[in-house]
Amino acid sequence: MQYRKMESTGDDLSTLGYGLMRLPQRGGAIDEEKAEKLILQTVEKGINYFDTAWPYHGGKSEAFLGNVLAKHGLREKVKIATKLPPWLCKTRKDMDDILNRQLEFLKTDHIDYYLLHALDGGSWEKMRDMGAADFLDTAITDGRITNPGFSFHGARNEFKTICDQYDWKFCQIQYNLLDEYNQAGREGLEYAASKGFGIIIMEPLRGGVLAGKLPGNIRRLYEKYDSSRSNADWALRWIWNHPAVTVILSGMNHEDQIESNCRTADVAYAGSLTQREKEILKQAGEVFQASLRVGCTGCQYCLPCPAGVDIPRAFAFYNAHHMFRDKLTPWGMYLVQLGSRDGERSSLASNCINCGKCTQHCPQHINIPKELKRVQKRFEGLAGRFVASIVRRMMTVTK
């Protein structure tokens, strides 16, 4: 495992960190047996940065991580990062109450890397005016927090303002081939680096989009240069090439993903991309930008939907329909997987009641009801039922 020193904290951190937002599930809950094995595998591979948060897995992620680390005596071998949810803070006291609960969940007396979660300009102003700086200072002084930071989903000018208004040690931003100029983007990354912040990268594979089945012209670009590299390998190398990046978070939910990402982490040093590799990745990013319809990363912050819409999956099928040559399968799978079965309530876009609750929590600031109407228009109706019947027959034949 490759390590990079975060100069602001003095810690040598594994360049690959484990994000605990997408652990394997069974019956809608964490599959604890499988997830525990994954955590042990990552520690064995040398990963020492574990990122969780209050809302992950319905509020169960922190306690699960704490239990596994305590059970196997691993707390001192890893750095724990977790986050304070601004949307739950109504008073200064709420900040302390939540942090103290998190310490209990994680079975520890301190959080190594503590972030204000998913800030933008408005949420930062709220937290600042409520006394967030005093809260962080106090928690650092009494030892509950070691390093203060923030994760960000907002506009670039808001990012710079937040950087300037507290003595942060690090920040966490969304950055990948599709988001070089979105949110904080490259400009924000360079600004944070100029202030000496450690930089943690989230959504390096854009919710798995950059690791999945790619448009043919992108895959041909990759294979012509090196047919042995995976799609994830290309996307991760592009980020690790930036010397300012300390850790890339990956929500690995299978052993093979851990093995593959660790192999890439071993060789993806800063500045290691060749000029030809940079050109290939630039072309790939341009193709992706042209084909993506909705900028959803599948983070699930919009769920649960009061009307039962499976928003991330609806957008995933919609994007796949526009991104790949196979138009029929995503269309049919949307109707088959999200449609009503055996009298159960469907999860289709047409269920949207335009309540707007989802948009309040979307880190990408997507106008979700508006986009769901587009999904409905494209996928549902008489033609949609015809497509669904075809795909159902195909699935029956291939079973």
Image (tube, grey):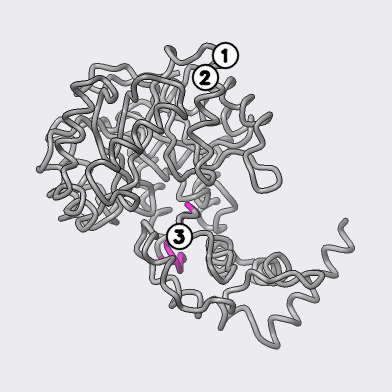
Q: Which residue is mark 1?
A: 72
Q: Secondary structure at mark 1?
A: loop
Magenta stretch, overall SS? loop
Closer-to-camera residue (95/192)? 95
Q: Position of residue 255 (x, y in %)?
A: 63, 29
Does the CB distance between marks 1 and 2 fall below 8 Å? yes
Q: Secondary structure at mark 2?
A: helix
The local crowd at label 1, few if under 14, some if 14 to 19, many if 20 or more residues have their Cα within 10 Å, is few
Amino acid type, label 1? His
The residue positioned 71% from the left and 64% from the top of the image is: 337
Q: Which residues are magenta?
A: 290-299
The quarter of the displayed image where residue 145 is located? top left
Which disc is residue 69 wearing?
Answer: 2
The local crowd at label 2, few if under 14, some if 14 to 19, many if 20 or more residues have their Cα within 10 Å, is many
Q: Position of residue 319 (x, y in %)?
A: 53, 65
Q: Which residue is mark 3?
A: 296
Amino acid type, label 3? Cys
Q: Earlier in the sequence, mark 1 or mark 3?
A: 1
The quarter of the displayed image where residue 155 is located? bottom left
